[in-house]
Image: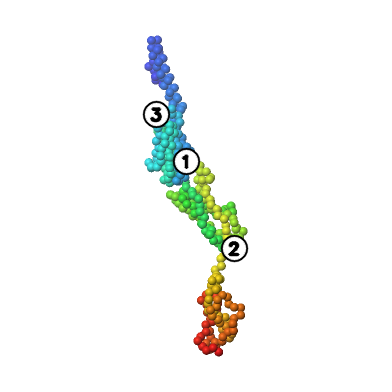
Amino acid sequence: MFALFSHISNPSLCDLPNFLLKMERVILGFMMVHSITASAFTLDFSPLNPVARAGDRFVLECRATGCAAAVSFSWRSLKDLPLNSKIENNGSVSRQIFDPVQIDLKSTTVACLATCGDKILSKRPSQKTTKVIVYSLEQPEISGTGDMVVGQESVFTCTVPKVFPSNVLTVQWLLNDRVVKEEEFSTSKALSLEEIQSQYAHTPRQEEQGRALTCKATLNLTLDLPKDRRSRETSVVMAMRSTPEPTTTPEPTTTQRNTPARAGWSQPADCTETLGCWTNLTGAAPASPPQPRRPSLAAPPTLGWSGAGCYSSCVFPQTKTA
């Protein structure tokens, strides 16, 4: 600024009006430069640490301050990847709308650039960039609880669909609010949405009847992810049978018992002495069988079952009755 005064030093009285005019212009110029420096043109993102759920609608806002003139905005990816979004500008605010959020956004650094008059903010150190953290976590599902028997081991499976990133996922099994198993999946590659399964083997006890078995899935993200979005859990009620179901042959039905059949009765079981047989029996066997006929013992009768499957029968050979 001192160079401006070098050619007007020691002004004469006749040059005084011009000197004062030049001094006024220099002072006004200095004040304008100072005003521009004091009011810096900056950008700010909202939210500060953007976290978006895959498949949801998410809005990233870029706000300019320190510019009295019109502001123009532009957005881009530092890797020149498509952002698959829509941009809405309103004065000193620009919004980038992702609807829906895609997994591809996970590795993209987003830059907001703005122009205030003839100043380009992207050439200044206060340029703003951010990286959107993308996640996905759905409600777990528990299977394997359909046929639990006290004292017999059951294997339960917890399925967590559409997980991202799976390498920060922890699955906990809780029995009556007590952690009985915890499993981490830190070795997962986490390249896309995944279905994660965890199994828990347990032998139910009688005192656990009616208690809650819970599968809880948690994404261990350190940024601004609310607790109610960081975890999902599902519970089932333990319902067990005391003993296994019997596997014996069921009793004949009433229809079977009333079916006419050829049946027999013998005493003793070898049918060699006292033998009683009858035919066309309907209903239950009589308490006292009729007087038996005695076939020739030279050809002993054969024993078998009637067509209805109800009674023992004696089939006599074609021999002469004694």
Query: Residue 26 placed where, x, y %?
Result: 41, 19
Q: Residue furthest top?
A: 13
Q: Considering only vertical position in the picture, is 95 above or below 143?
A: above
Give the mark toward the camera: 3 or 2: 2
Query: Which residue corresponds to the image point at 39% horizontal and 28% vertical from the top-left?
Result: 117
Residue at 53 percent across and 45 percent down: it is: 228
Residue 40 x, y percent position in the rendering: 45, 29
**What quarter of the picture does the C terminus occupy?**
bottom right
Question: Viewer-proximal residue, 203 or 138?
Answer: 138
Left or right of 113? Residue 317 is right
Determine which residue is flagged by label 2.
Answer: 242
Query: Callout 3: few (<14), some (14-19), or many (20+) C-alpha neighbours within 10 Å?
Result: few
* Number of residue marks: 3
Tag 1–tag 2 contact (CB < 8 Å) = no
The kind of residue on which mark 2 rests is Ser
Q: Nearer the viewer, mark 1 or mark 2?
A: 2
Q: Do callouts 3 and 2 mark residues in contact (Cβ within 8 Å)?
A: no
Identity of the amino acid at label 1? Answer: Pro
